[in-house]
Image: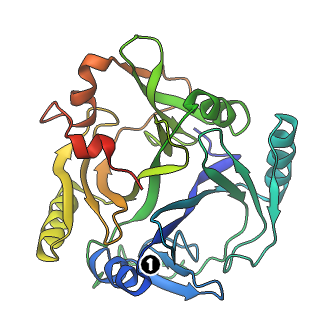
Amino acid sequence: MAVTGVLRPGHFQMRVLDLQQSVDFYTKVMGLIETGRDGQGRVYFKTQDERDHNSFIIREAEEAGVDFVGFKVQDKATLAKLDADLRAYGLHTEHIAAGEMLETGERIRFTLPTGHDIELYAEKTDVGNGMPYVNPEVFVPDGKGINPVRFDHCLLYGPDIEKAQKIFEDVLGFYLVEHVLMEDGKTDLAIWLSCSNKAHDIAFVRHPEPGKLHHVAFFLESWEGVLKAADIMSMNRVSIDIGPTRHGITRGTTIYAFDPSGNRFETFCGGYQTYPDNQPITWTFDNVGAGIFYHDRKLNERFLTVVS
């Protein structure tokens, strides 16, 4: 598909309990690159291969979890149109001035019925990926740690996921890729949405508490990269939730683990390509175990209940 309008997930801001411990974890274990700090105490990171100044931001707080998720849009005209469309849909939008976040242009923020803050923006400084735009090599050598390719998506927990879905579909141009039905065979337990031809750019699970984070995900290039990530996690005594394994939903290969603050993160690769005209894939409640963990075909209790 031609990627227009909302281009991709662009940044994710997360709360951590100990800032320096988290900086050490995300640079030394995850292999993210620190790109700046601001007067609010936030620390900014990017992956090795990302070109925009930042994609992952942390700040110290008394409670772990997600602050907001940002999506990059095509240009400033698109940002203005989507702002107007959101307001016409009945949502309040907040304008955040350029520069409030390092190297990032004006942002438009709104709150979903799930309790999560979503941002749209059009401009972020291109700092490159360590290689020239003319005659580059195929990768920057000596990457540290797990060394993911990009911040890829997040899974959010909250109520009213069908209302959130309508906003993403009707206003932002996303489409449903897969969904899991509850026991009644009608109501959605979980939904996977895309604005591109990735298997998902954001996902939601129905949950009584608003504004919760299940995981933030970083993309790796290969199954071998996932296995190496598991080795690095074990070497550093990282708390692994499950994996390495494969999803039935999206077909991605994966590991879930926890950062020092208890925020769950995913390192994964694979997943099929999809298009807006594809019929969504449906998973029935009795097969949700195979949908989430294809090899074990069952869920562990911690994966279902632990959120931040």
Q: Quadrant of residue 227?
A: bottom left
Residue 142: percent from left, percent from top: 27, 85
Q: Quadrant of the N terminus?
A: top right
Query: Outermost residue toward the top?
Result: 185
Examine the rendered structure and indicate whether residue 176 appears above or below residue 259: above
Amino acid type shown at disc 1:
Pro
Examine the rendered structure and indicate whether residue 64 appears above or below residue 272: below
Residue 147: percent from left, percent from top: 31, 73
Q: Residue at x 57, y 81 (%)?
A: 42
Colouring style: rainbow
Q: Quadrant of the C terminus?
A: bottom left
Q: Residue at x 35, y 15 (%)?
A: 183
Examine the rendered structure and indicate whether residue 32 appears above or below residue 96: below
Between 24 and 34, the residue placed more toward the observer is 24
Q: Residue at x 28, y 26 (%)?
A: 288
- Residue 162 as seen in the image, left or right of residue 272: right
Examine the rendered structure and indicate whether residue 21 appears above or below residue 74: below
Look at mark 1 in the image and give the residue it sits on: 136
